[in-house]
Amino acid sequence: MYSEGSLSPTRKPNSTRPISADTLLTVRSLNGGFSELPDKANLSYSQSYSIVNFLIETYGQEKLTELLTALRMRTD
C-alpha cells in the first residue's frame, strides 16, 4: 500500500475516524486478506499505509527493511 503513493483524499478521513470511535483493526489482522466490505477494506488500506509511513518516518527505510527481513526469516 505504501509503495503506491500517498493516501487518496477519500481514504485519509478513514484513518482518523476509527481512532476516535475506537474501531481500529489489529496489526495482526492486516497481515491476511482484506475484507470485501468497502468500509473495512478502506480502513485496512489506510491503516496499512499509516503503519508503514510511521515506521519509515520514525526509524528509516533501512530499519524497516531489516524488520521485514527478520520477520520473513522467522517464518521460513
Image (spheres, rainbow, N blue to C red):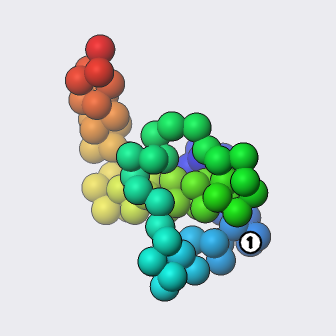
Whether residue 53 is visible: no
Q: Which of 28 and 13 is in front in this view?
A: 28
In the image, farthest residue toward the top: 76
Query: At 28% from the left edge and 55% from the top edge, which residue is drawn?
Result: 59
Whether residue 63 is visible: yes
Relative image position of residue 73 (x, y in whole percent): 26, 20
Query: At 23% from the left edge and 23% from the top edge, which residue is drawn?
Result: 74
Q: Which of 19 and 51 is in front in this view?
A: 19
Q: Is residue 18 above or below residue 38?
A: below
Q: Is residue 45 above or below residue 14?
A: above
Relative image position of residue 32 (x, y in whole percent): 51, 37
Q: Is residue 72 above or below residue 56?
A: above
The picture quadrant where one finds residue 38 is bottom right
Query: At 44% from the left edge and 53% from the top edge, which residue is drawn?
Result: 52
The picture quadrant where one finds residue 46 is bottom right
Q: In this view, does 74 lie to the left or right of 10?
A: left
- Report the number of numbered marks: 1
Question: Pointer 1: what residue?
Answer: 9
In the image, farthest residue toward the bottom: 20
Relative image position of residue 19 (x, y in whole percent): 47, 78
Query: At 47% from the left edge and 60% from the top edge, which residue is drawn?
Result: 25
Circle 1: residue type: Pro
Q: In this view, does 54 lie to the left or right of 59?
A: right
As helix, strand or loop, the secondary structure at mark 1 comes to: loop
Q: Residues within 10 Å of mark 1 (few under 14, many from 20)?
A: few
Q: In which quarter of the image is the C terminus?
A: top left
Relative image position of residue 67 (x, y in whole percent): 28, 38
